[in-house]
Amino acid sequence: MGVGQTGSGKGCEAGAAAPIPVLLVSFDGFRADYLQRFPLPNLKQLYSQGVLVEQITNVFITKTFPNHYSLVTGLYAESHGVVASNMYDHVTQKHFTTFNDTDPFWWNEAAPLWVTALDCGYKTGVAMWPGSDVPIRNRTATHFMPYNPSVTFSQRLANVTHWLTGVDDNVGLLMSELKHAGLWGHVNVIITSDHGMAQCSADRIIRLDDCLHPDNYSVIDLTPIAAIIPNGDPEAVFSLLSGCHTHMTAYLKKDIPDRLHYRNNDRIQPIILVADEGWTIVQRGGLPRLGDHGYDNTLPSMHPFLVAVGPGFLPGYRLPLLQSVDVYPIMCQLLGVPPAPNNGSLSQARCFLAGEDCVDIPLVVGLVLGVLLVLITLTGLFMLWRPRRQSSSRPFQRLSIQDDDDDDPLLD
């Protein structure tokens, strides 16, 4: 996704200098630790000149569509409405899949940056991004290329090493083309991903039909997070699913933990099943894939990375962790676009944005603890080295008064 300016529109500062364009690139399924596990010279060259965020905490569920929409809206899935790869709306009775995703109904609960930036007179372009060819709130990007999900998951995993090398080659090509066009150093580039990946096994299968009859439930989305509509008594169906498997947790919608931000939307189904890392939920049958994503977003295996380079970023800055919903306000800040209401924050990002003042909380805490440790050490050493003064006190003795002293005159 790219955004650049051609003028000034409503909501933007009149007369402000044109900001530097922003280019956001996402590599689907690129886990954070791939940067260290594989030789990726172009990516490493890129972050050596800019910012590296070692892990991004993405949104639940850790699937492609919810997370790509969070990157460009700054919202959790429950807020932007794209809650899964497969969805059902019980009011309209509409169905959504990755192959049937062009109805604006599913996207209109939020506006991505490529739409809101149009209000500032910007030209925007988006290619192969979920929702890229959908008229969201009756508008599309200035230039767009439709998302194509036809490449199957098994094809994507067929040769991981080759794919990773291809990713790095594409980064090198991007750098080369930007330099050739005279744009290197004149564009803020952000490279990230939507989620990581966990290894699955045929020994770790959870079959729902082993726990209850298929007539008792309908599946909207499946593995590793299953969205279930109970047919009949919801409590009875939930009770059966709750005891189905030790490596699967069942939640009634109202009981989904707050930390997941995955409860307050009508498209989230009455029962949500969450498999443990590496486990696969199926209705029946065997293992559909050898690797999967979608698991709890606290798992490091689900975390992507972020690399950023350009005049808007401080070179050589390292950050251990950032929230994916923070990427949207970062881009708005770089472009001077007033952000729509979002769940993100600039509190951490200000520390690696050029020209921004920030309080580096980890650094401050480290300095305070370091000073306290030095003071405690010096105090202890002072107490040990202080010489002990010899005691010169003598035991108290009462003076005796002789009786004949009273007989002696004071004056002769």
Image (cartoon, rainbow, N blue to C red):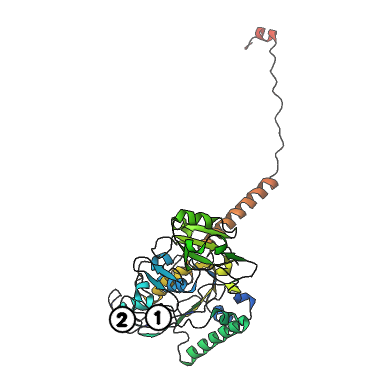
Q: Residues within 10 Å of mark 1 (few under 14, many from 20)?
A: many
Q: Is residue 395 visible?
A: yes
Q: Is residue 363 visible?
A: no
- The answer to whether residue 389 is above or below residue 27 is above
Residue receiving disc 2: 121
Give the x, y percent position of residue 65: 46, 74
| Foreground pick, 7 / 294 | 294
Give the x, y percent position of residue 405: 68, 10
Q: Residues within 10 Å of mark 2 (few under 14, many from 20)?
A: some
| Foreground pick, 259 / 243 | 243
Indicate which label's residue lies in the foreground, 2 or 1: 1
- The answer to whether residue 202 is above or below residue 260 is below
Identify the image quadrant of residue 32: bottom right
Amino acid at the residue labelled 1: Ser
- The answer to whether residue 92 is above or below residue 241 is below
Q: Which mark is residue 158?
A: none
Residue receiving disc 1: 132
| Foreground pick, 61 / 314 | 61
Q: Is tag 2's residue or tag 1's residue first in the polypeptide sequence?
A: 2
Give the x, y percent position of residue 386: 68, 45
- The answer to whether residue 228 is above or below residue 25 is above
Does the CB distance between marks 2 and 1 fall below 8 Å? Answer: no
Q: Could you tell me which quadrant the C terminus lies in?
A: top right
Amino acid at the residue labelled 2: Gly
Q: CA distance from mark 2 to mark 1?
A: 19 Å
Q: Extreme bottom residue here? A: 180
